Amino acid sequence: MAEAHRQHITRWFYDCGYDVHVGLAEMYLADERFTQVYETVTPGLARYVHDAILANASARA
């Protein structure tokens, strides 16, 4: 899921390397506006997406 998310960003928006993707993941928790986008879908989703992105980047390093 996290890799598909990264590739989607790269394909449709901008080059999203693993370091950029990790930065986005950090922002999903640090910035309330981004957190709310995920939390309105389901509670805990922001943390889940964050952790999945970090795990994906770590596995690729």
Image (tube, helix red, strand yellow):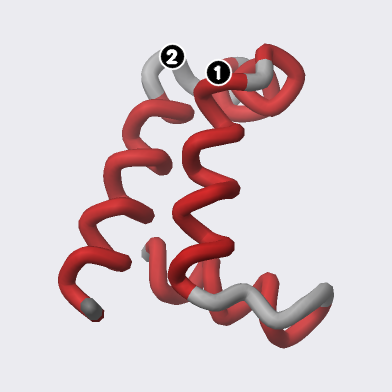
Q: Position of residue 36 (x, y in %)?
A: 66, 17
The image quarter in which residue 34 lies: top right
* Residue located at (40% from left, 73% from top): 3
Q: Is residue 6 left or right of residue 61?
A: right
Q: Nearer the viewer, residue 61 or 29?
A: 61
Contact check, label 1 and label 2, Cβ < 8 Å: yes
Q: Position of residue 21 (x, y in %)?
A: 52, 60
In this view, 24 is above or below 57: above
The residue indicated by pointer 2 is 43
Task: Give the distance between the C-alpha atoms of the residues marked 1 and 2, in whole angstroms.
Answer: 5 Å
Label 2: few (<14), some or many (≥20) within 10 Å? Answer: few
| Secondary structure type for disc 1 | helix
Q: What amino acid is found at the position of numbered circle 1 in the picture?
A: Glu
In which quadrant will I find the C terminus?
bottom left
The image quarter in which residue 15 lies: bottom right
| Secondary structure type for disc 2 | loop
The residue indicated by pointer 1 is 39
* Residue located at (57% from left, 63% from top): 20
Q: What amino acid is found at the position of numbered circle 2 in the picture?
A: Pro
* Residue located at (59% from left, 47% from top): 24
In which quadrant will I find the N terminus?
bottom left
Q: Position of residue 59 (x, y in %)?
A: 17, 72
